[in-house]
Image (spheres, rainbow, N blue to C red):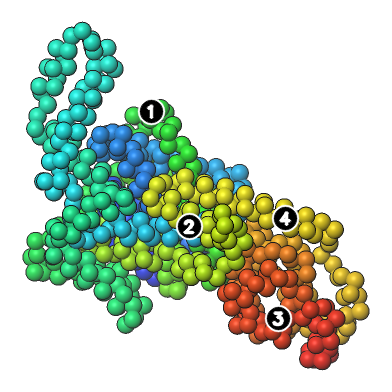
Amino acid sequence: MKKLFSNLKGDLFGGITAGIVALPLALAFGVSSGLGPSAGLYGAIFISFFAALFGGTDTQISGPTAPMTAVSMVVIASILASNDGDINKALPTILIVFLLAGFFQIGLGILGLGKYIRYIPYPVVSGFMTAIGVIILVTQVLPSVGYYAKEDTQFVEKFKPLAEEIILENILKDEAGEGVLVLENFKETINRAQKTTQADILKESKTLAGKEASGVLGTLKVLPRALKNINWLELILALGTIFIIYGFKRITTAVPSTLVALVVMTSIALGFSLNYRPIEEIPGGFPLPNLEIFTNFNLGSITPYIFTALTLSLLGAIDSLLTSVVADNMTKTKHKPNKELIGQGIGNTIAAVFGGIPGAGATIRTVVNINSGGKTKLSGMIAGIMLLVILLGLGPIASKIPAAVLAGILITVGIGVMDYKGLKAIPNLPKDAKIGPFKVSSEVIIMIVVLLLSTFWNLVYAVGIGLVIASLMFMKKIGDLTGKYSDVKPLKEESWADEKDFPKNLSEEVFIKHIKGPLFFGSTSNFQQLVKQIPNTASTIIIRMEKMQYIDQSGLYALEDILVDLKKDEKNVLLVDLLDQPRYMMERIDIIPDLISEESIFTTFEDCLTWVKQNVKDKF
């Protein structure tokens, strides 16, 4: 408790600032999910507060994020489709799936599985994150031009025959369930069908039209129609929002540009009494628990979504722990991964009970918190309280925000969340696999497969397929390498034979590190501990790489990060016996010669030792 209030002023300012930054994103993610802005705001309030209180990363700010919202959007659309588009009927099932995802996260933490999250290969993460960006970007095109398929009369009209067919099918299902369906006598069916009004048919037609225009494929199908029916006011509001977000960053980053865009564009729309489309109304007062998720619980209705809930929990775990690593690097602390998963799970379960969408650790909000002075769990709790105060005091005003403004905010989120580092590396990665007569990069294949499947098919299955492909390709590579180097026996972390005569007077000045075996996505975490092993007295680091036969993209970037840190600390890094494949990879992204010059690479340890004796001075 004493630690919680040890940095009250910094945590107060950090939490308030992070809460303000979270506001426009929470509203936008809520709208994007399909449950409305209040669901995004409720998720941000409860996840931020309880994930901070029970989590294992002191400075983490949690809430709805782009990846979690994208998967939630798929879950919501799927459950809505099986409930005839009736949100009131579908909501309990949706929230139970979110609740289950939170329970899974708590279970992952209790079982101590947080440390295994690092085994997700970089190409899978890269493809998934880029797909999230594409999905958000494409699906926000329609609201940014003011086109809503449900309100397009001509478009809706096309679905009336199918709507009548579905209504009749539902009548027959209801009769079969009630035991009154008699094939020889359709009097009851006819009687019920005659009670169907044009309003019922229109409602079902609108649901079908909305479903047809949903997702990336749906958006692309109706895009030509939308471009012929542009609402220029909505488009101007969206473009104005985007312009302010990117333009204001050039002036200052002290004030969040998304918040500035939200306030400015909403003020213009209200001040000039423009005839714009506002977001859904945000209910006033304190959020109330949705008890229907307990009273109407039906195991059969959620069984098809158990795997989806597990995937949602894993995604939240990855998202949160990656942000925790960022926080560690900024604060020079060490998070507790399993405790963090338990905290995220508690936050998500409580958010689900109150009707909020799920979330995870949010990198941008966490960075803002740290830069604003936040150092303890109190900052994340204050961020949640800040959002609650905004809800209670400014709910009616927030309900007047133009929908096009939130669409503009989401477009910038979609652009920002893509993995440009991974995309830029595509032309330079080695072509180590064959598809027919063509040689291609296995890591590029994984990235593109996950990207395409996530964008045009299913986010959940895409990640699973990507992991399977990555595992199979990795096993093949390791099998090939093991066969090639089968005569090499494992070595203990101790001085090698040719190091026995290393000058004792230089032992404090020179640190020798051995890399034994491939450096891949499963071993990067241990490798990143290298910097912590280096004594402060060491000015020269020798990395012996003759036993490192292979390095993948994850290992490559981990190595790059370590070399950057060592260069910042003015450490001189020497590489010994660098093999062909690792050297090729390091040259492709300019680690050689930008971070390691040719003069710092030695063929043998003897050559390196000669250089050390001539260039490293004995302090003693």
Which residue, given by chain and number where applicable, does mark 2 sit on? 448
Q: Earlier in the sequence, mark 3 or mark 4?
A: 4
Residue 123 appears in the picture as rendered: no
State the CA–CA distance, disc 3 to disc 4: 30 Å
State the CA–CA distance, disc 2 to disc 4: 24 Å
Tell me: 41 left or right of 521. left
Image height of 603 relative to 87, above or below: below
Which residue, given by chain and number where applicable, does mark 4 sit on? 480
Select label 2 or label 1 by which is in front: 2
Name the amino acid type tagged 4: Asp
Numbered circle sitting on residue 573: 3
Considering depth in this image, is 6 or 241 the residue closer to the camera?
Answer: 241
Select label 3 or label 2 by which is in front: 2
Residue positioned 12% across, 17% down in the render: 191
Q: Circle 1 sits in a helix, a strand or a loop, which is it?
A: loop
Q: Earlier in the sequence, mark 2 or mark 1?
A: 1
Name the amino acid type tagged 2: Ile
Q: Earlier in the sequence, mark 4 or mark 1?
A: 1
